[in-house]
Amino acid sequence: MVMKSLRRALEAKQLKPLQKITTLSPWIEGSIVSTSRFCGKKNCACHQGGSKHPVLYVTWKEKGKTVSLYVPRKLENNVRRWVQNYRKLKELTREVSDIQKQVIRLREDNP
């Protein structure tokens, strides 16, 4: 009887992270990378020895290789939030997975 109530408690415990997952949309897998680049305008100060322009990329692994995608300035805040949402998603799915492992262990000990 104690095992059943413990299982129920664990299953109820996983509802909280599952509910949080539903609020995270949208998300994007990857990391934010900031760098500086020359722009395409030949008359710009960056081509005359001035400082380069800051740019943002989102990077991720695909088939073992790093892929980069330029992030337009007007989307920077959104993309940062999407990457952060993905990190939260990974954390929450790990939490649910850990709870499920505990449930399995309980069933192994007392089938």
Image: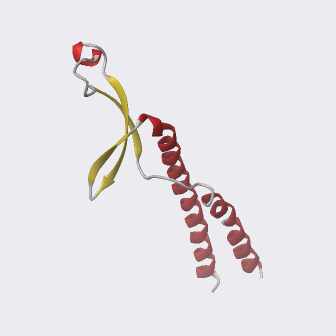
Observer-nearest of 33 and 12: 33
How many numbered circles are shown? 0
> On the image, which quarter does residue 104 sit in?
bottom right
Instruction: Name the residue: 76% across, 76% down.
Output: 5
Q: Is residue 82 above or below residue 105?
A: above
| Residue 92 spot, x, y in % from top left | 58, 58
Q: Quadrant of the C terminus?
A: bottom right
| Residue 38 spot, x, y in % from top left | 26, 25
Q: Quadrant of the N terminus?
A: bottom right
Q: Is residue 32 left or right of residue 107?
A: left
Q: Is residue 40 above or below residue 67?
A: above
Q: Is residue 88 above or below residue 15?
A: above
> On the image, which quarter does residue 46 sit in?
top left
Q: Is residue 17 left or right of residue 37?
A: right
Q: Is residue 93 left or right of residue 67?
A: right
| Residue at the extreme bottom of the image, as rendered | 111
Check the image and tell me how it is coloured: secondary structure
Q: Is residue 57 left or right of residue 19?
A: left
Instruction: Name the residue: 63% across, 56% down.
Output: 23
